[in-house]
């Protein structure tokens, strides 16, 4: 790859220009390799390499020390890459558009929970009244079996057995209703 030779406004005299041209010829591939190691697009690497020389040549003057010139050009290349990276860090994001996942619950989970809640309520309504009462008192209100038994006029073992049957039936009703209704989970 050969370096582009272009005339700049207010170009220096021919002796200085030939010195600058020679510096570009000797160091073009060196600077291009530094830039292209961090930039994927060839055209962008070429543009940034040109920018390195445009910034650095006025400061190099007519130095003949290749080692110092290369060190200066390498630092100029790193600075341009750093500037490019910084510029990309400050991209403006549209107001109101989140740039990361929110801390709230996932909308899909909310939809599934609401769908499941509707199926569960329908399954509860299909239970016999005594089983619904036992589940409400034991599960929702957290009452002990003895207290529920006293309210219903039964013994504590009968309440536990009634609760067990109610939960089994509720599970079967829920699963059959959930399998029949389409939800975001893909049930069919």
Image (tube, helix red, strand yellow):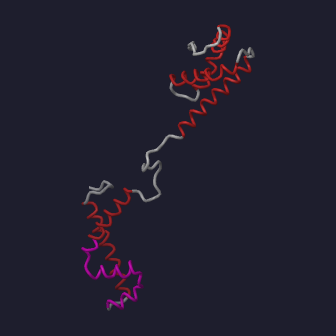
The reply, left or right, for residue 141 in relation to residue 92 is left
Point 32% across, 72% down: residue = 168
Q: Find residue 174 and report its horizontal and vertical position in percent.
A: 29, 67
Up/down of 167 relative to 90, above or below: below
Between residue 107 and residue 97, name the one nearer to us.
Answer: 97
Q: Find residue 179 and report its horizontal and vertical position in percent.
A: 27, 60
Between residue 2 and residue 153, name the one nearer to us.
Answer: 2
Q: Find residue 4 and report its horizontal and vertical position in percent.
A: 56, 14
Residue 134 lies in the magenta-colored region? yes
The reply, left or right, for residue 103 in relation to residue 178 is right
Instruction: Give the magenta range.
Output: 123-152
Up/down of 116 relative to 24, above or below: below
Point 26% across, 81% down: residue = 129
Residue 144 in which image quadrant: bottom left
Between residue 84 and residue 168, name the one nearer to us.
Answer: 84
Point 46% across, 44% down: residue = 93
Which part of the image, by quadrant, shows the N terminus?
top right
Between residue 16 and residue 102, name the one nearer to us.
Answer: 16
Residue 67 in which image quadrant: top right
The reply, left or right, for residue 40 in relation to residue 60 is left
Point 28% across, 62% down: residue = 178
In this view, the residue farthest toward the front is 10
Q: Find residue 46 and report its horizontal and vertical position in percent.
A: 54, 21
Residue 62 lies in the magenta-colored region? no
Which part of the image, by quadrant, shows the C terminus?
bottom left
In this view, the residue farthest toward the top is 14
């Amino acid at each position: 790859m050969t370096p582009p030779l272009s005339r700049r406004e207010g170009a220096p005299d021919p002796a200085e220009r030939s010195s600058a041209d020679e510096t570009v010829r000797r160091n073009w591939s060196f600077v291009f390799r530094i830039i292209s190691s961090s930039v994927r697009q060839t055209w962008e690497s070429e543009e940034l390499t040109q920018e390195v020389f445009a910034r650095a040549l006025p400061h190099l003057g007519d130095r003949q020390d290749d080692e110092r010139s290369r060190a200066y050009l390498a630092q100029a290349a790193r600075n341009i890459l750093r500037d490019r990276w910084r510029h990309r860090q400050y991209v403006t994001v549209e107001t109101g558009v989140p740039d990361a996942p929110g801390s709230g619950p996932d909308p899909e989970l909310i939809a599934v929970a609401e769908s499941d809640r509707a199926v569960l309520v329908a399954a509860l309504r299909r239970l016999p009244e005594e089983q619904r009462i036992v589940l409400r008192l034991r599960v929702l209100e957290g009452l002990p079996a003895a207290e529920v038994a006293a309210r219903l006029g039964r013994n504590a073992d009968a309440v536990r057995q009634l609760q067990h049957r109610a939960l089994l039936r509720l599970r079967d009703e829920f699963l059959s209703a959930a399998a029949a209704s389409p939800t975001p989970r893909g049930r069919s």
